[in-house]
Image (cartoon, rainbow, N blue to C red):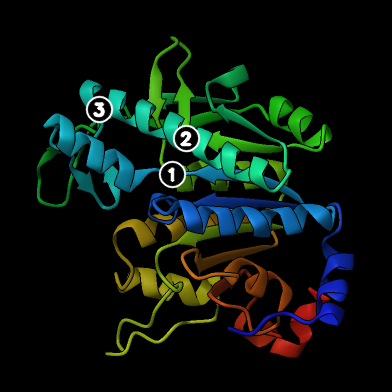
Amino acid sequence: MIIPNLKTILEYAQLYRNQLFVIKIGGEVLSSTALLNEIALEIGFLNSLSIKVILVHGGGSQITSLCQKLGYESIKINGKRITTPNILEAVIVSLNQLNLKILVALKKVNIKGVGISGIDGNSIVAKKREATINNEGEFVDFGEVGDIEEIDVSLINSILCNNCIPVVAPLAVSEEGRILNINADTVAGALASKLKAKKLIFLTDTPGLLRKENKSGLLIPFITVPELTILLEEESIQGGMRVKIDTCIQALKNGVLRTHIINGRTIDSLLIEIFTGMGSGTMITELKEADIYTQQEKIKQ
C-alpha cells in the first residue's frame, strides 16, 4: 500500500492536532494479537502528533465463539445480537478479556490506556429495548439489549485530560441498575456525536463499502449521505454494515465532520486513510454531490 510521505503527514498533522478521533475496533480485527500490536503502533503514532483518541471495541466473533463453547445458541437479527441472560454473561467475559488485551497492546508502545465500560461512572445509561414485530410478523425480543438514553462524558474527558486513551467496552447500565448489552458501533457513534469528534473511524474486516452491483465488489472510496440514502432505500446494504452506515449518517448529522469504514486487518490502513488523499477505505460525508472535492483538496478538510 502507499505509505504517506513526511511532508503530507506534517500537513495533515497541523489540521488534526488536539482534535478528537473516535475509533471502533471490531472483534474480527482483535482476533489477531500480532495485528492488534500493529494497530497499537498506529494509535501511538496518532498520539505522538497530539491527536486525541477514544477506542471503542466490539467482540462479536469472540462472544459467538464463547457461546458455542458453552452451548448457548447465539442469534443475530440485522446484525444485532439477541442477548439472553446466559449470553449476557458471555458478553461480559469476552469484552473484559478484550479490553485488557487492548490495554496490554497499548502498554507495549508506551501508551497509557484506561479500560472502562459504559457502566463506569454511569457513562452510558440505557433502557431495555422493547420487543417488536419483524417484517415477517414474528415477535422479537432482543433480551438484555439496551438503547442509549443518556451519555455522561465527564469520566472520558478526565481520562483524555491525563493524556490517556479511554478503551471503552459497549456495556451500559439502566436507571434500575441493570447491565445491558449495546452495539459497539452505536456506542462509538454516540460518543463521537456527544464529543463532536473530528472523525469516527470503523476498523472492520472488510475494505469498506463495496458496490454490490459489481461482481468484483469494487470499493466505494467516497460517498455522501444523499447517495447513501438511495442505497439504503434500495436495501443494498444489510446486516452489520447497515448498522455502521446508519451510525455514520447519524454522527454526521450530529456534528462529526468525517466518518470512515476501513479494513483494520490491513497493515497501516488507518494511517493511509488519515494521512493520504487517496485513503484506504470508504469516507462518508454530509456534502452534497455538487460539493464533492477532489482527492487533492482533501488535505484542506
Rendered location of residue 257, percent (x, y): 70, 62
Q: In this view, does 167 lie above or below 36?
A: above
Residue with the mark numbered 1: 58
Identify the image quadrant of the C terminus: bottom right
Identify the residue at horizontal 9%, vertical 42% (top origin): 138
Rendered location of residue 293, percent (x, y): 71, 85
Q: Which amino acid does label 2 sit on?
A: Pro
Query: Distance between the Cα atoms at labels 3 and 1?
Result: 18 Å
Q: How crowded is mark 2: few (under 14 residues within 10 Å), some or many (20 or more)?
A: many
Residue with the mark numbered 2: 170
Mark 3 vs 2: CB contact within 8 A: no
Left or right: residue 68 compared with residue 264: left
**Which mark sits nearer the N-terminus, 2 or 1?**
1
Identify the residue at horizontal 66%, vertical 36% (top origin): 166
Q: Residue 143 carries which label?
A: 3
Please tell me which residue lies in front, 285 or 2. 2
**Dot 2 lies on which element?**
loop
Q: Which amino acid does label 1 sit on?
A: Gly
